[in-house]
Image (spheres, rainbow, N blue to C red):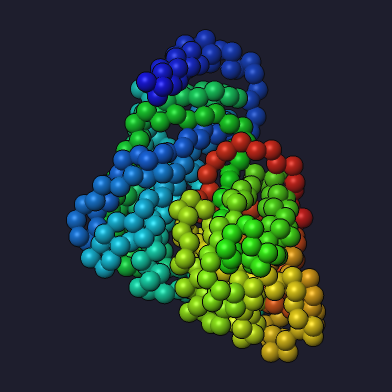
Amino acid sequence: MERTWMFLLAGLVGCCLFAPGTALMAQETKTVMTGSHYLRGSLEKVKGVVMTDKGPVEVAFSGTVGFQIRRTPKAGFAVSLDRLSLIAKGVPTAKGNSGLIGLSLASPGYAVKYDRKTGQFSAAFRSVLHYELIDKVKGFRQTGRAKGEMDNFAPYTEKMAGTLRGRLPANLMPAEQGTLRFDGEATMELRSPALGAIRNLKVKFPGSILEWLKSPAELLKIQPVFVGAGAADPDATGRAYETLKNRAAEVFGKCGTVRCLKLVFNEPVYVDNDSYRVLDDSAEAINFKSEVNVDDAIEVFFAERMSTSLTCSWGGGATYSSGTASAKIVTSDQQLSVPCPCPASCATYCPLGPCTCGALNNYHLAHELGHVVNLAHPGDSGLAPSTATSVMEPSGFCNDNPGTQSAKNCRNSANPLLYWGKALCFGSPDIMD
Ligand SMILES: [Zn+2]
C-alpha cells in the first residue's frame, strides 16, 4: 500500500516537473544552468535471471543505477549512463556455487540515446563481472612485485557487453531536486571469460525511483572483524582499528571537491577462535577471511600479529579480490606496534627509506582500501592507475604509506559496493592529479 502511494506521488511529481515541457523550457532558457546534474536510484532486490553453464537461475539483485545530465551548447542536454552496479548472492554453476556476484560499469560514462517525445532510451555499455568462484578456481594475479610489497591480490575479472533500455519521463529537464519514475531493463552477455560459469543475465527494474542530485555522494560500508568473544572481551583484537579507521576516513575525505566518497563503518563482529590471533601463513589468513561474509560491506579482519615472513612480504596486511564486491582486507594490530628494531628481513620490502618502528603504519588501512576501490600501486598494471607519492605508494611494514590523496585516485575509484547517498564533502586532494 505504502509502495503504491510512493509511486503515485512520484508520478505526480514527474507530471508537474516534466509534463508541461514547453513552459518549463521557456523558463529554462532564462536560467543559466551550470555543471552537471545527476539522477540516482537504488535497486533493491530487483528481479534478475542469470544464465549459468547449468541453466537459468532467478536471482534478486541490489545496487545503484545513475545518469549524468550535462548541458551541451547546441542540443540542449546530453544524457549518459554513469552508474550501474549490481550485487547478488551466489548461484549454482557446473563448477560449484558462484559465491557473491558483483557487477559495475567498466567506465563511468556511456552515451544514452533518449527520445524526448516518448521518454524511451537505450544505452550500450561494458561492465566488469566478478564472483568469488573465479578466485577459488583461478587464484589471484599478484601485482606490485616491482616495488617489493605484495599486499594486493588482484582477482581475474570478466567483461560483459550490455544494453540498458527503458523509459524516463518525456521532455526530461535537469532539476535541482525531486524524484522521477524510471522503468529499466538491462541485459548483459559475457565477452571475455576468465571462468565463464555465468554466460549472460537480465535484470528488470520497473517503477524505480530516481532522485535528482547536484553532487551525489558515494558510500562504502566497512565491516571490521576482530578475534575475541565479543565487545566486552578485554583481549579482543582490533586495538589498531580506531586510529586506522580515522586516518582512512581522512584520506577518503580529501576526495571531496573531485568526488564525494565516504566510508561508513559498521560495528565490529567477532570470531571467537584464538588460532587467528597469530597468522602463520597466507593459508591461515585465507581461512580467517573466510569466517565472515557481509554481502554489502568490505570486511577488514584484524589479527594480533602475523609471522615475520608474512608481515614483511605483505607490509603487515593485504587486500584480496581488489576492486570487487568480494574484496576483503586481512591485517593486524601490529601496524601500530612495529617491533623495535624493525625486523631486518623486512628491509627489502620497505622502499620508502630506512626502517622505523613503533606506532607507525597509520595510513595502512587507507592504502588497502585504495586497493579495495580498484587502485593499483603507482606504475603497476592490473588495476586502475594511481598517483606516485600518494597513499597508494607501497611502503612495506617498517614505513608508513603517505597520507596524501590525489584527484586521479579519487576519480579512478570503483567497486560495485559503492552506493549513492547524501553526504557533505569538504576536503580537496593534496595532489591535483
Ligand atoms: Zn598496496
Looking at the figure, which quarter contains the C terminus? bottom right
Residue 35 found in image quarter: top right
For the residue pair 217 and 360, the one nearer the viewer reads as 360
Residue 308: % across, % down: 64, 85
Q: Can residue 273 be seen in this view?
A: yes
Q: In this view, does 122 lie above or below 353?
A: above
Residue 236: % across, % down: 63, 66
Q: In this view, does 95 lie to the left or right of 118?
A: left
Q: Can residue 79 be seen in this view?
A: no
For the residue pair 410 and 80, the one nearer the viewer reads as 410
Q: Is residue 46 above or below residue 107?
A: above
**Farthest residue toward the left?**
55
Q: Is residue 334 above or below residue 31?
A: below
Residue 151: % across, % down: 59, 74
Looking at the figure, which quarter contains the N terminus? top left
**Farthest residue toward the bottom?**
344
For the residue pair 121 and 345, the one nearer the viewer reads as 345
Q: In this view, does 213 lie to the left or right of 245?
A: left
Residue at 30% across, 47% down: 59
Residue at 48% across, 55% down: 294
For the residue pair 196 and 62, the one nearer the viewer reads as 62
Residue at 54% across, 40% down: 420
Residue at 64% across, 73% down: 304
Residue 324: % across, % down: 48, 59
Residue 94 found in image quarter: bottom left
Q: How many marks?
A: 0
